[in-house]
Amino acid sequence: MDTVLLYALGVVLFAVGIAVSIGLHEVGHLAPAKRFGVKVTQYFVGFGRTVFSVRRGETEYGLKAIPLGGYVKLVGMFPPHEGDDPTRVRKSNTGLFTQVVSDARSAEYELVEDKDLDRLFYKLPWWKKLVVMSGGPLVNLAIAFTLFGGVFMLHGVPEPTQTIAVVSQCVVPADAPDRECSADDPPTPAARAGLLPGDQIVGFNGTPVESWSDLTTLIRANTDGAARIEYVRDGELRTATTNTTVNAVVDLDDPRAVVQAGFLGVSPTTELVRQGPAFVVTQMGTYTWETIKALGQLPVRLYDVGKTVLGLQERDPDSPMSVVGAGRVAGEISSDHATPALDRFISLVMLLAGVNLFLGMFNFVPLLPLDGGHIAGALYEGLRRGWARLRGRPDPGYVDVARLLPLAYAMAMVLIVMSALLIYADIVAPVDLG
């Protein structure tokens, strides 16, 4: 029963964290829009049926039943059709796509009064549009940066020490580290040398060892050669001799690959080391680049998830997950009794930070209905107007992103199908955390 309650607590905490992140994302749009004088009629977290709402001034604030997103209603997102009165948009057109665009324009001006004509979003200078539409995803990135930075700087990052935690008794391949030793498996060089957990290695073949990274480099370079190991046990400096062997080990540059290298057969203890701002910036840069690469590979990964759903292959541990899958991970983290409570909480914080990083970068994709589509429109407007000024040409006017609405609706359908696929996969073939 305790496990069930902890699982539920993890899911609830994660859901609350996501809801707060969504709310702050929308504040990232709301605050600059109001600052620039745009008429904002609604601010909601969630979709579907309204659970709660309250009106403050001209804006209605509230929660909806399905907490899978949110929105801010900025009046006048699309300019009127060229030559039309902005308050009297044409009601019908020939052609399906033309009608779709016209209907969207009509909806934009249902709440526009004469006094609001100077408060329409499309009339903002391009750089103000850029600020408003970038505000949401930038808030997600700020949340990720704050959460990751808080963990790295206040809690610390596990770093290996020179003290041995485990001495492997036999040589096994890197892809089967948990396999039991058999009579046919040779003993590891560390076992032959008599090394024990708690020994602190301070030298290898005459070279002083000041970190576990130094030792790893020396061992891997010592392929099937003599090894003289200096270590401290119970405060006494000792020396052991053995011969390292060659084994398949995890590649230091690519954890998913294995290489043949020198092998001793020891694992280090770890200790938490608090990091500084430089580490946070460097690590965030790495995480951001990895997220960008993951976004580029998303179509292929979704295809693989589809094959998993059809039973054609196993689910890749690195495959994308829906919010349902992430919630399940949160539950499993929270209910893992083998892990200290503080470490479980830190893992939940890291999970929420990772989700915010992905949401922020995903929303920068330059396609409607994502924020990146409007950001691209604002940048194009600024470039087009600037180029016209440089050439002494007339102002080309506002960029009409409404013309891209058919593509936006197609993209929205893709997002719905993608979400449905991932949710279904997370139910029938969840990612195995191992």
Image (cartoon, grey):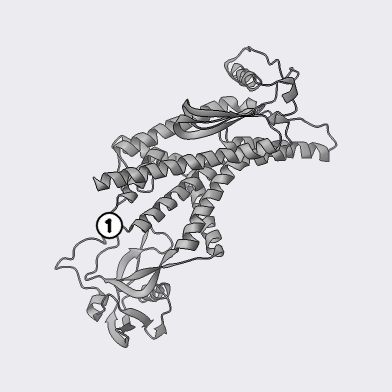
What is the count of numbered marks? 1
What amino acid is labelled 1 in the image? Ala
Q: Residue furthest left?
A: 183
Q: Residue 389, percent across and down?
A: 82, 38
Instruction: Please indicate whether residue 118 sits to the left or right of residue 169 in the image.
Output: right
Q: Which corner quadrant of the image does residue 164 belong to?
A: bottom left
Viewer-proximal residue among 125 and 139: 139
Residue shown at the point (42%, 41%) measured from the top left: 15
Residue shown at the point (43%, 79%) measured from the top left: 210
Viewer-proximal residue among 235 and 81: 235
Q: Residue 258, percent across and down?
A: 35, 61
* Tag 1 residue: 338
Q: Residue 290, percent across and down?
A: 49, 52
Q: Relative to residue 285, is residue 416 depicted above or below?
A: above
Q: Residue furthest right?
A: 392
Q: Is the N terminus in the top left, top right, bottom left or bottom right quadrant?
A: top left
Residue shown at the point (19%, 63%) measured from the top left: 180
- Report if residue 146 is visible in the image: yes
- Report if residue 320 is visible in the image: no
Q: Relative to residue 4, is residue 88 depicted above or below?
A: above
Q: Which corner quadrant of the image does residue 130 belong to?
A: top right
Q: Which corner quadrant of the image does residue 27 belong to?
A: top right
Q: Residue 433, percent across and down?
A: 32, 50
Dot 1, how many residues are within 10 Å of its Cα: few (below 14), some (14-19), or many (20+)? Answer: few
Q: Secondary structure at mark 1?
A: loop
